[in-house]
Amino acid sequence: MAATVDGQATGTDAYGIVQGDGGAVDKMSGTSGNDRLEGHAAFNQYYGGAGNDTFIISYKFAVESGAHQGASTAFGDQYAYITDFGGASTWSATGNDFVAFSGFGAGATLTLSHEGTSGTSGAKLYYYTITTAANEVFNVLINSVNGKALATGDYAFY
Ligand SMILES: [Ca+2]
């Protein structure tokens, strides 16, 4: 099974990344292996599947696409939704996922704003806000399949 973007089979670029195609929505789905997925749209939905997946959330596309800015837990106000984050707050040999926040700049922070009930057994929804040094705020929703919040080692800003 190939990775897909908006339902269409998609290969990787020269860096091994499955790139979204932009617009209003990118819905990306990885393979059973290790995937790197990068959304380009105003709303980006990530499904990594099995493997150790990296979800790349890009400041550049948030700004270019006019993604919602300002803290909110409304689904329609999210910039990114990771539907199956694996291995939060712990290390797992299989399904150890990672979030790469790209281009948000020095001083950007990730803050947990709200916890919600997941539709997946054992999982939990976590609502985060990314705040840049210039006080731009973007919302990210993460469905953590082991029920735990993200911890150091689960994400980094670049
Ligand atoms: Ca995968």
Image (cartoon, grey):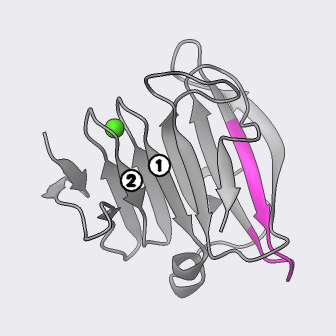
Magenta stretch: includes residue 62: no
Q: Quadrant of residue 53?
A: top left
Depth order, front residue of 138/154: 154
Question: Total marks drawn?
Answer: 2
Classify residue 151 as left or right of residue 18.
right
The Cα atoms of the two marked residues, 2 and 1, are separated by 5 Å
Q: Nearer the viewer, residue 5 or 30?
A: 30
The range drawn in magenta is 126-137
Q: Residue at x 45, y 27 (%)?
A: 95
- Badge 2 vs badge 1, beta-carbon distance below 8 Å: yes
Q: Residue at x 49, y 64 (%)?
A: 43
Q: Which residue is mark 2?
A: 36
Q: What amino acid type should be assigned to the residue bearing mark 2?
A: Arg
**Image: 135 above or below 26:** below
Q: Quick one: quadrant of the N terminus?
A: top left
Q: Tell me where residue 44 appears, x and y as whole percent.
A: 46, 60
